[in-house]
Image (tube, rainbow, N blue to C red):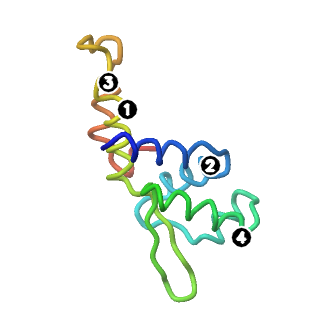
Amino acid sequence: MKDDAAVSALSALAHGDRLAAFRMLVRAGPEGMPSGEIADALSIPPTRMSFHLATLERAKLLRSWRDGRRILYAASYDDMRQLLAFLTEDCCSGKPEICGNLADFASTCLPETCS
């Protein structure tokens, strides 16, 4: 991952509503959730939620697809792993006891275990 992609992803997550939505979608798994359900669960107006979800999607942290009249969103686990790996790749300056298994977690995190 390049610095500009990491900055984009971290900037997208630097808002309480977007962070809450992203964490909810990580827990939801690859099936994702409809945008309306996300908005309802977080008590955010649907138009504002759409704006936040679009921001996360532009940062490549989410993917979306249409299912009839609904738009579903899911976490992009590959991009999430890339961001975690980017943040931890220089971890500990060769002293793994400092970071514990953080670097291992970033490289092996699966959708069902990343929440």
Q: Is residue 98 above or below residue 87?
A: above
Which residue is disc 1 drawn over? 87
Tell me the SS state at disc 2.
helix
Q: Position of residue 22 (x, y in %)?
A: 54, 52
Distance Cα–Cα, label 2 vs label 4: 16 Å
Which residue is disc 4 drawn over? 47
- Pointer 3 and pointer 4: residues touching (CB < 8 Å)? no
Say which amino acid is labelled 3. Answer: Asn
For the residue pair 109 and 61, the one nearer the viewer reads as 61
Which residue is disc 2 drawn over? 20
Q: Nearer the viewer, mark 3 or mark 4?
A: 4
Q: Residues within 10 Å of mark 2 (few under 14, many from 20)?
A: some
Q: Residues within 10 Å of mark 4 (few under 14, many from 20)?
A: few
Distance Cα–Cα, label 1 vs label 4: 32 Å
- Pointer 1 and pointer 4: residues touching (CB < 8 Å)? no
For the residue pair 38 and 46, the one nearer the viewer reads as 46
Q: Residue furthest bottom?
A: 68
Distance Cα–Cα, label 2 vs label 3: 25 Å
Image quadrant where residue 3 sits: top left
Say which amino acid is labelled 1. Answer: Leu
Q: Nearer the viewer, mark 3 or mark 1?
A: 1
Q: Earlier in the sequence, mark 2 or mark 1?
A: 2
Which residue is disc 3 drawn over? 101
Say which amino acid is labelled 4. Answer: Thr
Tell me the SS state at disc 3.
loop
Q: Position of residue 17 (x, y in %)?
A: 67, 51
Q: Earlier in the sequence, mark 1 or mark 4?
A: 4
- Pointer 2 and pointer 1: residues touching (CB < 8 Å)? no
Tell me the SS state at disc 1.
helix
